[in-house]
Image: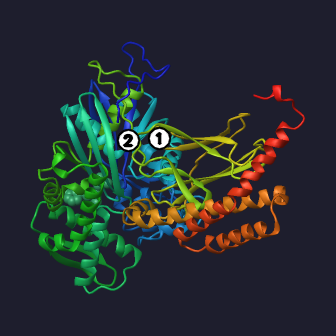
Amino acid sequence: MALLQISEPGMSPEPHQRRLAVGIDLGTTNSLVAAVRSGVADVLPDELGRPLLPSVVRYRDDGPVEVGHVAWECASEDPRNTIVSVKRYMGRGLADATRHPSPYTFVDAPGMVRIRTDFGERSPVEVSAEILRVLRARAEASLGGELVGAVITVPAYFDDAQRQATKDAARLAGLEVLRLLNEPTAAAIAYGLDHASEGVYAVYDLGGGTFDISVLRLTKGVFEVIATGGDTALGGDDFDRRLGDFFVAEGGLGELAPDDLRRVLKAARLAKESLSEHPEARIEARIVGRGLVSVPVTAVQFHAMTRDLLDRTLDTVRRTLRDANLAAAQIEGVVLVGGATRMPQLREAVGAVFGRPALIDLDPDKVVALGAAVQANLLAGNRGEDGDDWLLLDVIPLSLGLETMGGLVEKIIPRNATIPVARAQEFTTYKDGQTAMALHVVQGERELVADCRSLARFELRGIPPMAAGAGRIRVTFQVDADGLLSVTAREQSQGIEASIAVKPSYGLSDDEIARMLQESFGTAEIDMKARALREQQVDADRLLQATQVALEADGDLLDAAEREAIAAAMRELRAVSQADDARAIEARIADLARGTEAFAARRMDRAVRQALSGRRLDEIG
Ligand code: AMP
């Protein structure tokens, strides 16, 4: 991220008066709040000295909502009303929410699922807002004043819907969002500023529910994100589920009731964490009708049953390095983020991929919140004394583009472009007298619209009628610092404009982004062929249309035989134009173009004659 030295208007603080701002890591499993005090970023603990707030919310009828440790204690007893891992459901539709087993009853709702509790339906935004409210209160109590705002971190792969949902949750909690910041980027800030390191770094972040990998270049004072990759549906929870399945199989248990399932997953998580320290552990859970079931598991068994999960993350690492045109050996350090990176087999495997041990100086649970706090402090206008007032810019994870003729995608902003970013491109009208243009905004790496994700559609109306190809429509894509997109189309001669802000299109398929990326790598050649075919088909249509118009206007310039020859060439082109042979279409286009050369010349003569008729020679030239 090119570090911009942005001085925000109206944000310079009074001398000695610091504006209170915090960094919040709103995690799947745990959340944290941190602030810079006396020039040092630190996590703010609760009144019992605990830094982590479990991201768990319990609804009750006989008292206020419970959040954090108390709620987590009740997760097994009251699973329907105790919401865990709500981050997985932010900005998601029903299909995604129900992909993983969970004890919840989901209700389909426009935009985003809702979770049915015994005390009413709750949206994931409301649930997240409860967590943020607690963190806000904690911060205001320890800092002794009202906050001007917060920097909230999100996984790099969060799409528009998920980012917007996060902002909505903050607003609901009464927090001003200074910026949403990608989690690995926040970690890099914490490391970069703490250690003043230089070089290319990778940030490997495996939390409870998501995996992110980012490649960042750090030089003194300048941070740049080179590439990002990840998987929104892979995390420590998946390792728990494997241990849970193992427990069910070894214990000879059948399908589990929701309460039992919750207890088993909790026991599995404890065993997993214990296996980070010890060669063996026991998974122990009370099962209704069976009493206490205790299953021993060794670290070796655990590693074997989860090796494929680890390998999935490593595949993504390699792919992201390829994106960045870097060999693993060029990475000078690998930063580990997220509680799940405490697993020793993971540290070893990541170290092996990069050929060097991973960096673990900072607590992997806190590093994101610390970086967010540094950023929040700067955004609030509290300048560093030694001038490290850098603001980081992120990259967009998937290309953004427009649908063009033939269902093709014209990429306007390529993936990995640094944000905020604005790019414009000119388009033209396709038909004579065209007065409206439909714009379809898509996201993805593929060449065909059908293979990309549709983000929004809008229309530009009131284009002055002109010949095909004469209209000039400038389309501008703008992605703001939070990764939200707005698209504007402007007709250049009269300045007529239409625009759309891409608001949450909630209800995306869960790991759609990761899948779309993966697909694009394997299909580049097929896509190029498909693109070539579509382009020929569009050219064919255009030529057929133009020839038809010409025949209607000036058909009298041809004799019957000539007319029939052109009609035959048109028939032949039409016959092949919808088949999937680009070369055949190209050949027939060439035939028709050749067949109409003489006709075109005669039309030109006629047009010139008409233009000159009635004018004296000395008026011309
Ligand atoms: P986060 O989302 O970053 O809070 O990460 C939470 C995940 O880290 C959960 O899946 C935890 O079980 C996991 N985790 C925390 N501590 C350990 C540990 N010592 N060993 C293995 N996994 C851990």
- Density class for disc 2 (Cα within 10 Å; few <14, some 14-19, many ≥20) is many
Q: Residue 154 vs residue 330: left or right?
A: right
User: Is ligand 1 less than 8 Å from the beta carbon at label 2?
Assistant: no
- Density class for disc 1 (Cα within 10 Å; few <14, some 14-19, many ≥20) is many
Secondary element at tag 1: loop
Q: Residue 282 vs residue 614: left or right?
A: left
Give the residue displayed 22% in from the left and 41% down from the top: 200
Q: Amino acid at mark 2?
A: Ile
Give the quadrant of the N terminus. top left
The foreground one among 461 and 373 is: 461
- Seen in the picture, residue 145 relative to 117 is either above or below; the reply is above
Question: Residue 37: which quarter of the image?
Answer: top left
Question: Residue 290: which quarter of the image?
Answer: bottom left
* Residue 157 coordinates in the image, percent (x, y): 40, 53
The foreground one among 126 and 423 is: 423
The foreground one among 9 and 534 is: 534
What residue is pinned by disc 1? 482
Q: Please give the count of numbered marks on the rendered protein.
A: 2
What residue is pinned by disc 2? 24
Q: Residue 527 vs residue 369: left or right?
A: right
Residue farthest toward the front in the current orientation of the protein: 617
Give the residue displayed 36% in from the left and 34% down from the top: 392
Q: How is the image coloured?
A: rainbow
Q: Amino acid at mark 1?
A: Asp
- Among the two numbered marks 2 and 1 on one chain, the one whose residue lies closer to the N terminus: 2
